[in-house]
Image: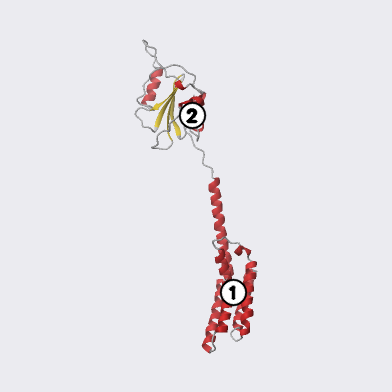
């Protein structure tokens, strides 16, 4: 329907322009008709008037261009001098206007500009919404103990944010050794509050040790929870505690020596 109306308007404009070649009476009515046709056409295409600001006036200008061109040619016909050459030039202008309007179809071009701008705007809105509502993927853990540490201590606002549990070892019945590291490679382990750990684990502060891992940098820290196992003086050990501690020292914590041993009830989360 719109395409047919556009074609009819183009033919009507050509007729008016041709009539204006030899009759000035076509000038004023033709110019008014062109303006009225542009106004009615824009009113019938509200999407052009409500187009995104980036293309609104461009689309309106493209839509109204043939109407303005028709009025301009009518005025030019009235002002043109007499003579065969002048008439030929005016006829050429009419032919140019007709051909451009017929093949370029400014009304359709304006609507396509608006549609493309609205589609881009919609895509940008959807992308922005997806970015705002995107859910960060849940972290993965190598073990149940690492998950327990990550969800209870390493969360934002926790006792040890920005850390991960690297290794842990039950040194004795009541002593647990933990090696933690910084989440970001090359960063030191943040300061860990001993009172915070004590409150979180419900463990006396004197039974919590936080220190460096011998032979390693500040990117890892050693936590000992509970009293370290010891061997009684004057007697030979059965080797169980010493062997376990030596295994830790040889793998996770090289250089750590067995100092003392006792028993303390370990928390079930890490056992």
Question: In terms of image quadrants, where is residue 211?
Answer: top left
In the picture, which quadrant includes the N terminus?
bottom right
What residue did someone put label 1 on? 67
Classify 218 as above or below 71. above
Q: Which of the 4 image quadrants contains residue 22? A: bottom right
Q: Secondary structure at mark 2?
A: helix
Category of crowding for the residue at label 2, using alpha-carbon neighbours closer than 10 angstroms: few (below 14), some (14–19), many (at least 20): some
For this orientation, the residue located farthest to the top is 234
| Residue marked by disc 2 | 145
Q: Cβ–Cβ below 8 Å for labels 2 and 1?
A: no
Q: Which is closer to the viewer, label 2 or label 1?
A: 1
Observer able to see residue 37: yes
Q: Quadrant of residue 121?
A: bottom right
In the rendered image, the residue lying farthest to the bottom is 83
The number of numbered discs placed on residues in the rendered structure image is: 2
Q: Pinpoint residue 263: horizontal percent, then vertical percent.
A: 46, 17
Of 256 and 3, the residue lying toward us: 256
Percent coordinates x, y for residue 69 in the rendering = 56, 75
In the rendered view, would you say 214 is above or below 84?
A: above
Give residue 23's position: percent from left, percent from top: 61, 86
Please state the horizontal and vertical placement of residue 105, each as a whole percent of the image. 57, 71
Residue 98 visible in the shown view:
no
Residue at 56% x, 58% y is 119
Q: Eyeballing the image, is 179 above or below 51?
A: above
> Does residue 222 lie above or below 126 as drawn?
above
Near-viewer residue (159 or 9) = 159
């Amino acid at each position: 329907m719109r395409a047919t109306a556009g074609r009819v308007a183009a033919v009507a404009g050509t007729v008016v322009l041709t009539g204006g070649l030899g009759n000035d009476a076509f000038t004023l009515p033709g110019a008014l008709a062109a303006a009225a046709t542009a106004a009615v056409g824009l009113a019938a295409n509200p999407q052009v008037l409500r187009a995104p600001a980036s293309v609104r006036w461009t689309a309106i200008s493209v839509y109204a261009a043939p109407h303005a061109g028709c009025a301009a040619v009518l005025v030019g016909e009235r002002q043109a001098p007499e003579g065969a050459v002048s008439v030929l030039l005016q006829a050429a202008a009419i032919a140019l206007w007709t051909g451009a309007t017929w093949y370029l179809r400014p009304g359709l071009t304006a609507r396509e500009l608006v549609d493309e701008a609205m589609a881009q705007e919609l895509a940008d809105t959807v992308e922005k919404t997806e970015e705002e509502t995107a859910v960060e993927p849940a972290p993965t853990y190598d073990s149940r103990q690492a998950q327990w540490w990550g969800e209870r201590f390493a969360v934002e606002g926790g006792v040890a944010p920005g850390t991960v549990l690297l290794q842990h070892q039950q040194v004795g019945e009541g002593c647990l050794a933990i090696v933690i590291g910084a989440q970001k490679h090359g960063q030191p382990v943040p300061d860990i509050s001993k009172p915070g750990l004590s409150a979180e684990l419900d463990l006396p502060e004197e039974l919590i040790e936080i220190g460096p891992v011998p032979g390693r940098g500040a990117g890892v820290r050693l936590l000992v929870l509970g009293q370290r196992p010891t061997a009684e003086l004057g007697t030979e050990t059965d080797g169980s505690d010493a062997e376990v501690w030596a295994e830790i020292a040889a793998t996770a914590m090289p250089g750590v020596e067995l100092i003392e041993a006792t028993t303390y009830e370990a928390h079930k989360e890490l056992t």
